[in-house]
Amino acid sequence: MAATLLILSIAIPWFGALVVWLAGDARPRLQHGLAVAFSVLAGAVAVALLPFSSSQILLSIPVGGAFGDFTFAADGLGVFLAVVATVVGSLAVIFSVGYMRGEQQLGRYYALVLFFIGAMVGLVLTTNLLLIFFFWEITALCSYALISFYNDDPKAVAGGIKALIITQLGGVGLLLGALMIFSYTGSFDLRDFIAQAGNIPQTALAVMAFGFLAAAAAKSAQFPFQTWLPDAMEAPTPISALIHAATMVNAGVYLLVRFYPAFAEVPGWRTAVMLVGMLSALLTAIMAMVATDLKRALAYSTVSQLGYMVYAVGAGGLFASQFHLMSHSVFKALLFLSAGAVIHGVGTRDMRLMGGLGQKMPFTRAVFVIGALALAGLPILNGFWSKELVLEAGLVGGPLWMWVVMLVGAGLTACYTFRMVWMVFYGQPRAKLHAHEAGAAMKTALAPLAAGTLLTWLLAGPFSKLLESTLPLHALESHSTLHYLEEVALAPATLIAMVVIALGLAAWWQRARLQGLVNALSGVARAAADSFGFEAINRGIVRATQNSAENLRVTQTGLVSWNIFGIMAGLVLVLVILLLGA
Amino acid sequence: MTLNITNVAVLVVLGLFATGFYGLLAVRNLIKVVVALQILVKGAMVALVAAGNLTGQLQAAQSMALTVIVADTIVAVVALALAVQVRRCIGTLDIKALTSLKR
Amino acid sequence: MWHVLASLGILVCAIQAIRSQRLLMSALWLAGTSALVSLLLYLLGAPEVAVIELSVGAGLVTVLFVFAINIAGEEAIHLRSPLPRVLTWVTVIAATVLVGWMVFPGMAMPASVPVAEPSFTTTLWVDRRVDVLLQVVLIFSGVLGVLGLLSEGRAGAQKESRQ
């Protein structure tokens, strides 16, 4: 039963991708309907898998000796992320019915979205390292193809290529780590590895740990790879909500959490993880302060919030990190989708041209403000509880100065969030824009997310119970919701954090009086608008990759004779190796 | 080295391999590439049966050789169909003309 | 003595098949190779495969070649290979010598005791059932491939005629 559900949760979206694609672009209504049906079905199946969560292997497909068995486990961590992927995925697909109406090539769009959902579910449910790598690369492929969905727009194509190359660079780290794990443990099962991690030489373990950290940083757009995510905003907005806010970028955090028990003892690894999270959170919060593009501002805030999760993992607060991941998936999907409704309504992404849209789009304003309050971390929305838990975990498990930096980041978050809300929905209209309210399909997708933002913090208890069934050696304890609420509400740290957030709000409120300070910091603002120079590094990586590919084109003559020569040279090489070995 | 049948068979295998390799590398006509491939595969088949003869497992070798024959025939059929299509579309069988994907 | 003659014949035919400038002659030399290979297989003690090789390799495949050459047309291409001649010879010699080097030490090993084997029919249909299944799949996919290739040609022709 449970094994069937597990297979279905991967197979339904993939089968749906095939069906939607084969339905043909001549029948867009049918394509919309099929995509919604399949994604909702996948969501239902994943939710139905929740009660079956256990740390045992659920399904093992023998595929011969070479790569171990293809094992799948519906453990707490995996099921939780599978539910996030499929549920947010189905809401994004429902939203797309309104957002993508009248677009060309819907078959490609929906097929890739469904393909992505299936791959994401596979990534979090498998325990076979080869399959993890396989699904990891599929998600990167879908992300690339969807960023470049408008493939006649050079900016979209460049953004897609950049995302692909940077995440592939991280993928090399994953591959290296996985190969080393195989060569040391002789098993492709990550449970074997986590159990035996203590027996592996320290240096080898360190290489694996930092390889995985590089993979996670690239995937989750963390420091120093944080610049691909803003460029990925050329994708259609539902894609930004699904892939670049709620699911795929969480894969990096997932990887860190999954392997945390194995790597926690590597000297310096936890500090490095916290440092990566802290730098990402702080730098991108500053960048979000000066961003003028609505989606880019949201992208910066995504990187910043992912930084909080990574920081929590490094501090040992796995529950806090996953709880924040849940809250963030919900409220960031809400923010992105309502931003999509705004963009769809007014036809521009430039916040400087918006303003005063609240009267024309009251529903969108209401849900966006809910999401924004959660992002800022105001009580009693879900973002408040999870962010406080993250900060508390940081206070317990990390150095004080990092905690202070993260607090500053929380203040900045509140500040840029209100700047965003103000520029879009309040004040005087700055340009003549014909805005119209979101359609029925968009509202259908936004309402559940808004409700979730208001209420998911009540699930803290059941959620910790769910995470208890994560793979062995994670040693996560479960508590009741009340326990977590008390813990957050009574901690003095919460009060300090609230004061900092209030300061952030006040700073925005009194921005006119702080003009002197703003002028003094204009150098920082300029640097932030330029991504603190990391944009140049990332662009350099992309250019180097493309140049080397261009130079290697020489080897591809397209002539059969040369290809056969290559095969023959390989044969000679193999024979020589065999002779030397014998 | 005596000229018993397995030794001779192995020499034939080497000869067929060399001929086939040379053909694959040096020939420019698409249909002759298929001919070279056939010669190479015949070498592999003789090698299988010779090995069976040497180790006394002729029946297993025969059934494997049968698989080789089937696969080889299918390869020939598909490759020849491709060659005919290439001739139809490009107008020549010269493999040097087959580089239109490389731009 | 027969096996030496057959072997010499095989090599001559194979070399002629590659050297011959006319495609039709090439195909016929290939048929000769195939026929002599089947004789060698018979002498090696594999009569079943020898018969199949004779009918399929020398018969069916030759017919196919002649058929294809008939459609595609005779086209003698005398131009030199795009690969440098030295590179070709070095690769061929290196590969062949290395294969020989690996094979001949194995030839010196004492002839193993003949295993009591079941008949060819049993081996094929029982022990190697998977192989047979694979062959069936292969034949089907081959047929489908050829049909696809030919029908594509027809569709293309239709499109052209419509234009």
Image (cartoon, helix red, strand yellow):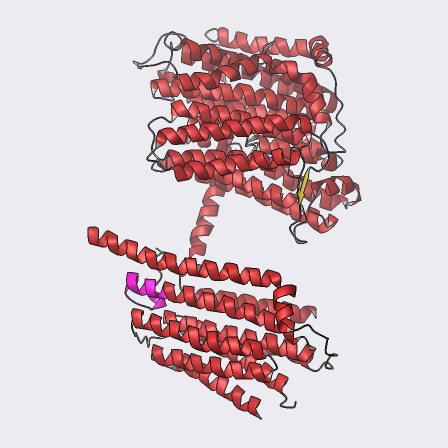
Taking the spot 62% from the left edge, 9% from the top edge, the residue there is A498
Report how many numbered discs are placed on residues in the image.
0
Residue A64 versus residue A359 in the image, above or below: below
**Measured from the top left, where is residue A199 in percent x and y?**
80, 44
Q: Is residue B84 magenta?
A: yes
Main SS, magenta residues = helix
Write the start and end of the magenta stretch as one range: B83-100
Work out whether residue A225 can be spotted: no
Q: Quadrant of the C terminus of chain A?
A: bottom right
Q: In the rendered structure, does residue A128 fall within the stretch colored magenta?
A: no
Q: Give the vertical position of C16 relative to A124 (above or below).
A: below
Q: Nearer the viewer, residue A542 or A29?
A: A29
| Residue A271 in picture, x, y percent from top left | 69, 31
Q: Residue at x 40, y 9 (%)?
A: A358
Q: Is any atom of residue A418 visible in this view?
A: yes
A412 sits to left or right of A490 = left
Q: Is residue C14 above or below residue A295?
A: below
Q: Residue furthest right?
A: A199
Residue that sits furthest to the bottom in the current view: C1
Residue in view at x 33 percent, y 79 percent = C22
Q: Nearer the viewer, residue A67 or C125?
A: C125
Viewport quadrant of the N terminus of chain A: top right
Q: Position of residue A92 (x, y in %)?
A: 47, 25
Q: Position of residue A128 (x, y in %)?
A: 66, 43
**B47 and A393: which one is in front?**
B47
Q: Quadrant of residue C127?
A: bottom right
Question: On the rendered structure, is B22 left or right of B13?
Answer: left
In the depicted structure, whether residue B77 falls above or below residue A231:
below
